[in-house]
Amino acid sequence: MNKTLELIFLTSEGGNASLTVDTPIEPIDPATVQAVMQTVIDENLFISPTGALTGIKSARVVSRGVEAVELGV
């Protein structure tokens, strides 16, 4: 099962922007995630199509599984 950590930010023009971290270290520490997100905002590291990142909206772990279908060919 593939997992990613999705960090979702508020932007200066009222939109949302997300950053994705592949294969995050588990267990996820909410305090560390929040601190990193705040650093990204404070250091103005990214600008999205809807402006600068201005606030933290949410974070979530997304799991994706792929199962092959045996076709017998």
Image (tube, grey):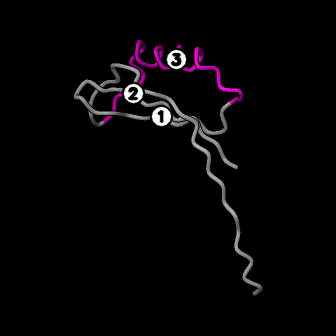
- Decide whether residue 42 is among the magenta residues: yes
Q: CA distance from mark 1 to mark 2?
A: 8 Å
Mark carried by residue 72: none
Depth-wise, is mark 1 or mark 2 nearer the camera? 2
Left or right placement of residue 54 versus residue 8 in this view: left
Residue 57, by quadrant, is top left
Three-letter code, disc 3: Gln
Residue 67 at x, y percent in the picture: 70, 64
Q: Which residues are magenta?
A: 25-48
Left or right placement of residue 8 versus residue 26 in this view: left
* Location of mark 2 (residue): 9
Depth-wise, is mark 3 or mark 1 nearer the camera? 3
Three-letter code, disc 2: Phe
* Location of mark 3 (residue): 34
Q: Is residue 1 above or below residue 15?
A: below
Residue 48 at x, y percent in the picture: 33, 33
Marked residue nearer the N-terminal end (1 or 2): 2
* Location of mark 1 (residue): 19
Three-letter code, disc 1: Leu
Marked residue nearer the N-terminal end (3 or 1): 1
Q: CA distance from mark 3 to mark 2?
A: 11 Å
Residue 47, by quadrant, is top left
- Disc 3 element: helix
Residue 45 at x, y percent in the picture: 42, 22
Left or right placement of residue 65 versus residue 13 in this view: right
